[in-house]
Image: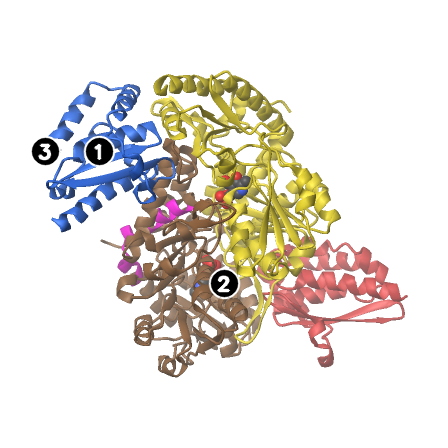
Chain colours: A brown, B yellow, C blue, D red
Amino acid sequence: MDFDIKKIRSDFPILSHTVYGKPLIYFDNAATTQKPECVINIISEFYKNYNSNVHRGVHLLSAKCTEANENARKTIQKFINANSSKEIIFTHGTTDSINLIATSFGDKFINKDDEIIVSELEHHSNIVPWQLLCERKQAKIKVLPFNEKGELIVDKLKNLISKKTKLITLNQVSNSLGTINPIKKIIEIAHSNNIPVMIDGAQAIQHQKVDVKKLDCDFYVFSGHKIYAPTGTGVLYGKEKWLEQMPPYQGGGDMIDVVTFKKTTYNELPFKFEAGTPNYIGNIALGKALDYVSSIGISNIAKHEKELLEYGTQKLSEIENLIIYGNAKNKTSVISFLINGIHPYDTGMVLDKLGVAVRTGNHCTQPVMDHYKIPGTVRASFAFYNTIEEIDVLYEGLLKVVKMFN
Amino acid sequence: MDFDIKKIRSDFPILSHTVYGKPLIYFDNAATTQKPECVINIISEFYKNYNSNVHRGVHLLSAKCTEANENARKTIQKFINANSSKEIIFTHGTTDSINLIATSFGDKFINKDDEIIVSELEHHSNIVPWQLLCERKQAKIKVLPFNEKGELIVDKLKNLISKKTKLITLNQVSNSLGTINPIKKIIEIAHSNNIPVMIDGAQAIQHQKVDVKKLDCDFYVFSGHKIYAPTGTGVLYGKEKWLEQMPPYQGGGDMIDVVTFKKTTYNELPFKFEAGTPNYIGNIALGKALDYVSSIGISNIAKHEKELLEYGTQKLSEIENLIIYGNAKNKTSVISFLINGIHPYDTGMVLDKLGVAVRTGNHCTQPVMDHYKIPGTVRASFAFYNTIEEIDVLYEGLLKVVKMFN
Amino acid sequence: MTIKDRQQDIVEEFEIYDDWMDKYSYLIELSKDLPIINEKDRKEENLINGCQSKVWLDAKFTDGKISFSADSDAIITKGIVALLIRVLSESTPQEIIDADLHFIDKIGLKENLSPTRSNGLLSMIKQMKLYAIAFKSKE
Amino acid sequence: MTIKDRQQDIVEEFEIYDDWMDKYSYLIELSKDLPIINEKDRKEENLINGCQSKVWLDAKFTDGKISFSADSDAIITKGIVALLIRVLSESTPQEIIDADLHFIDKIGLKENLSPTRSNGLLSMIKQMKLYAIAFKSKE
Ligand SMILES: Cc1ncc(COP(=O)(O)O)c(C=O)c1O
Ligand SMILES: Cc1ncc(COP(=O)(O)O)c(C=O)c1O
């Protein structure tokens, strides 16, 4: 398939908008992505035509929504090549997924003095749940560090692993630096030590083909809103053997089999982990978003984003005193940078007025900022609907910033 | 304001649809409600014009979404008359809210041998989280029973309360019977014994004015999707004095202040309890739904629904051998019934073919069904957009059911 | 008669009804022909618990053929159970394993076999095939 | 000069700029006039931690009037801090308590005071008013 950027951009209604009278240039894709019209439309369509609570309904609309919700589960299963749709749990986002695992897997398998290895590159959402767990269980977190380029020092893993290591958890792609971590290798090392691995795929799934069977990861989680789907949706993939052993996380409707005040038994997978009315309209739209991504082709997406990354990196490097944080060999289309002496907030405020939306701050990765001893960065993160010309506008804007503040 | 049912029905696109060639009669409102066009539209509008991740963003779109999200919080605050918007936590639904309280309040305040009083009328979502908590903490659940009419026997509360009672939790309205519980009285009794009270308002908030200050409840929770808002949204109201003392529930982005691998400190209320990217588009649409309800007027809604309940009760009572479960003096517009000898599934399947959507089964309240020694009921639940004529169709359909199966 | 023939028979029987009401009424009739499971066989292991209705199913293996008996608390479910048993009972394990049950679709009752209705019927078919596999291994 | 007069002055100064670039450039100029907080006063209690930028603020009470000193790590924030201090410093506690800071809105920098930008400025104004209340109670 040909990659027709004009056609693609026209799929996203927001991209033709202006801010302050200037064309919107949306470079905050790592925070959240924009939605194609087909995703926006399916939400309206379902509310206008079929909306009804799922599961156990005898009437037609309920059956329609249930079926669409379960079809979305199958779409996700295929998208990540899971063995069974039982292994796909609908959650409300990456953070929700990780908390589920930390609580449920944690309560079952983590005990006093046990150790969990977390990478230094993690988002707070993959740090704090483990800290809360470790506090409850008096377990310990060990940190796998990264080098100056922003690459994990995998050689150190062997020294961190001990008999007490019960889980390794890390992201496939760092949200603040863009580093693509060698998770296949890490999973192999972990498994050769009988240690399960959880992968935070929040910044990976939208940029490259993910095959959980090939990766052989034990858990894989991601957010819908970062892969062109609505807010309030998310996925937890877990190997059946783990999910079967894990106790329920939340209690409520749909996750139970029999309830009496004396004794309650739980439903089978995946429902055991889905308490309460699910965000079924969101889930259905998530399925649609993945279909959309598949229709563009994830390798086409990766190819275009690689061009954006290369062009952007080269262009921004031309600016004097601009330092790019994160120079890993394997990177997604994220450029985190600082212009010497200029506060990220000042840069961001000026770019905003020029129509360029970037994120500034620590990007929920304080340990990464602490590593570089900086308070934050300016982060431009590209999606496949961005263009070379937009990067030129960013470049011109940064020249303006330099002139204003130096 | 005049209650113009034609105008109101035209606000809800789905209501003009047909199923199997027959006009849709949607009597499954206790499971989920339909959405007015203004709610459906605001979702599209935000995705098409403003979508951007909230909080900490320096750019215009992020500011817009943050502002709209926080305005929705204020709308909710006003809607239930809370003291401060700090007391309004966005969750993903009633079940999520209750699990948050059970875990966070439970971990802090419930210890071995402590007791929690739960009513016999509860939805599984207000039973199972407490069972899970009690298992963790070796605490006990005591059950406040109801009488044959489906009314709580409040007199028994005194005997259930002990020095060990740490919380009373019950719904304001029963989803399977429609009973409106005397929560104000129960809260008074509880408070005179220094016991906090959690109210599950999932079936109340859409039917009557709720004033948490007047009620003086300690917690109040509800789901967006049951009050004309999108799926995946919910609210937890808690008195500031409790929320301040409670530890965080989920860990992640936005709920933290400072994160290091050594020590993490938490953000202030309400953010302490909102980990990860919130369902901000859903929250914004929830605000819109409450505005819509306010524009109709909750007392107008209550009045029309009372008419539907009275007419429906009278009409259905005309059917021989039809037994209505739940005959409390104070009821919302829910009629749960069985026709002697006919299985609810058979009744539901036939009604479905006639275009009438009802729910059949135990309605996630197995203890209520056990009380009556029945496997389930047929439940018709009315919203303010339903009509007397629709009830007539239900009545005719039930006569057909009787003829077919007897 | 093969499983295929029996399905064909049923399809023809239903052809005269084009109204769902008549179909349901006929199903109610058929429910009376169901070989009802013995009281003593209504045990926990033979119960298939759909959320909406329950199905009890038992299987006996005699002379190389399987015969089923069953019951359900809901009549529409029971009628479909009766049809399924009429089609599959008195067949060899291999015939049951190979059976492609297209008749449900053809007579317009497909929705009753949708996992979304949760009436125990899908689990019941699975259970019938499992019995067949089990008995085959004993042959 | 009253607080009102000082706000009026600022509004007039900004009137000549209708372009946000010029306004920002002027803010950058103004940031240089900020009465900078003493090194020894840059302590934890004087730090206002917006997510995006930090503000340090100190207040002294002499002869019935409050004088503020401050700093920020971001220059745009610092420029606005300088304006706020120019308006409020050297006033009595009561004047500060009563002050209605409409000028920010009038000069078109309102968005910088939105809670959504999280730059510490809103908390700073709150802090200035709290100082005023505290000093008033000591009068
Ligand atoms: C009284 C009551 N509580 C709790 C719930 C659970 O709500 P949700 O499924 O939206 O979490 C319901 C919904 O059926 C309910 O009726
Ligand atoms: C790597 C990574 N992990 C986790 C998260 C949290 O995702 P969410 O906020 O959607 O729960 C993010 C989002 O910023 C992320 O980039």
Residue at label 3? Answer: C2
Residue A177 lies within the magenta run: no
**Contact check, label 2 and label 3, Cβ < 8 Å:** no
Residue at label 1? Answer: C84
- First along the sequence among labels 1 and 3: 3
Provide the secondary structure element on which disc 2 rests: strand
The residue lying toward the viewer, choosing from B28 and A78, is B28
> Same subunit under labels 2 and 3?
no
* Quadrant of the image occupied by residue C18: top left
Dividing the image into four equal quarters, which quarter contains ligand 2? Answer: bottom left
Q: Is residue D129 left or right of residue B221?
A: right
Chain label for disc 3: C
Provide the secondary structure element on which disc 1 rests: helix
Residue at label 2? Answer: A359
- Which residue shows up at 27% across the image and 28% down it? C79
Q: Give the residue type that dot 1 points to.
A: Leu
| Residue B56 seen in this snapshot | no
Chain label for disc 2: A
> Same subunit under labels 1 and 3?
yes
Q: Give the residue type that dot 2 points to.
A: Arg
Q: Residues within 10 Å of mark 1 (few under 14, many from 20)?
A: many
- In percent of width and height, residue D136 lies at 86, 63
**Region rendered in magenta:** A282-303
